[in-house]
Amino acid sequence: MFKITQFDHTADIGFNIEASSLNELFKASAIATFDTMVEIKEIKPKTKKTIKLKNNKIDQLLFDFIDELIFLKDSKYMLFSKFNVKIKQEKTKEYSIVSEIFGEKINPKKQPLKIDVKAITFHEFFVKKEKNWKAKFVLDI
Amino acid sequence: MCKLNYLQRKINCGMRLITSNLTIKEVQPKLKELIDHLFKIVPAGVGSKGFLKVNQSQFKDIMKTGTKWCIENNYGWEEDLKKTEAHGCITQANPDKVSQKAISRGLNQLGTLGSGNHYLEVQVAHASSIFEPEIAKVFKIHTPEQIVIMVHCGSRGFGHQVASDYLKVFDQAMKKYNITVKDRELGCAPFNSDEGQDYFQAMACAANMAFANRQVILHRIREGFSHVFKKSSEDLELNLVYDVAHNIAKIEKYKIDNKIKEVVVHRKGATRSFGPNNPELISEYQKTGQPVILGGSMETGSYLLVGTKKAEEETFGSTAHGSGRTMSRAQAKREVRGDKLQKEMEQRGIYVKTVSMSGLAEEAGIAYKPIETVVDSLDKSGISKKIVKLVPLGNVKGNANLNFIQLSGFLIALLVLLMNLIL
């Protein structure tokens, strides 16, 4: 379960995400990122890619995850719509994520494209656990 | 040398202005054909790929030499080089400081507009909008109702990846050097530290890629005009007036406390505005000062100004960079519908071609400050002087934002510089 709320930002686009688990928080963040670029429901989950990342800090892991998704969009010309996320905390306290992501090649003739996302920023950025997991980030567009 | 090195996003986002010998009378009947063709050959929007395919080794040359690579590979004219800020090359560029991830993102992005507020616009210089005819003539704007072309874009995803990579490096470096900032996005490191120097050299690579990107776009514009008007680009006199960055950090020399000192000027949402007789300028512009290109909204028009000595004395050779947003994207979308705006603009004689209607709505004129107010305040302050107003006729829109609140742009440059001035 998750909730995505877009907030007003003069030049870029910001999101508040609330989710029942870390896995859902990351999944919702990925959905918010791609729904900024395209009507996400129109992207068919035809091709699978796997992302594996590690970081000692959970906020930096989210930053790295979104950064990797944006990189795949530009380097593989793909948009993604389905995200399976598994996050673990190792005994060393390090967080690791394995995410299977599904999408298809960019095709402006078939897909209702919106606006390109160039980067996730540290502006107002946080990940924290209250009753639920919460994240806030601004996408540079 | 300076104390801190702030990280730049949108590295070498900048403007390019090209003149032609066409007038509105010749272009108006073919405007739709022209814009549709330019839209086809200069890709814009999410995940756009350019026509130019380069390999890793060529991309490294582009990172090192910028515009020069384009001229050597027949994507421009020799004179384009001298009409680009820094001759289209920041010499400190070192490709070894750039990640493979950034290179992979940039490989196919040369010659693309991208998204955001980036655009390619066909404009007209109405006779009544030429405020300084003698200076305008030096910049090759000499005929009533003359057609010009303006380009706004930068280093694309490549530059953003360079920034994201070093943002993470700086996030750690700030702890190491006991630096605290109010916003983590303002990552920084001492300029002479390993992290600071590595970033500066990587940033220069992204800046050079941006110069090359705008040069390849100029090449495509020349091809496009030639195709539509059935004349060579030389016959159409598609001359570059200037290419100027408005998001870049550069080492420059200024007189401070009666001594010439070397400083790092960070122009974040600010344009260089060098006045007459500046040794950086080419002979043609020695008497006038440097052309300054200010982008407005797609509905209201843009301006060509000229740099001044006053800017060199008071704002480290900097002025503003555009009209700047006053309304968030979400708010603009609540107030304007993209398809309706497109039709209304067409009725007013402005033909817009975009990949995204929602993106178009975000760029509506009401979301921006009035450009006249901005330009008049710059003119009045004397840090740049207005020469010509340029009115839009046709626009290829990547769709979206002038990122920094523009009027504060040169103030940002000034403030950041003052913070860095510890030599």
Image (cartoon, helix red, strand yellow):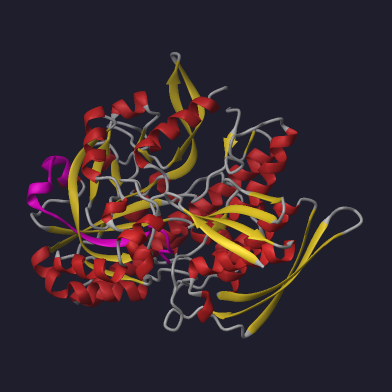
Q: Quadrant of residue B122?
A: bottom left
Q: Quadrant of residue B191?
A: top right
Q: Is residue B225 left or right of residue B193?
A: left
Residue at 87% x, 53% y is A93
Whether the magenta-drawn stretch holds residue B266 is answered as: no
Quadrant location of the N terminus of chain B?
A: top right
Range drawn in magenta? B112-136
Residue at 57% x, 76% y is A78
Q: Nearer the viewer, residue A45 or B26?
A: A45
Coordinates of residue A72 in the picture (x, y in percent):
62, 69
Residue lying furthest top:
B258
Whether the magenta-drawn stretch holds residue B126 is answered as: yes
Coordinates of residue B41 in the picture (x, y in percent):
36, 74
Residue lying furthest right:
A91
As drawn, A34 above or below B287: below
Determine if residue B218 is in view: no
Q: How many numbered circles does the render carry? A: 0
Determine if residue A24 is in view: yes
Quadrant location of the C terminus of chain B?
A: top right
Q: Nearer the viewer, residue B56 or A4?
A: A4
Coordinates of residue A99 in the picture (x, y in percent):
73, 71
Q: Is residue B332 left or right of residue B348?
A: right
Residue at 8% x, 67% y is B25
As drawn, A10 above or below B310: below
Residue lying furthest front:
A131
Coordinates of residue A84 in the picture (x, y in percent):
71, 74
Q: Nearer the viewer, residue A92 or B112?
A: A92
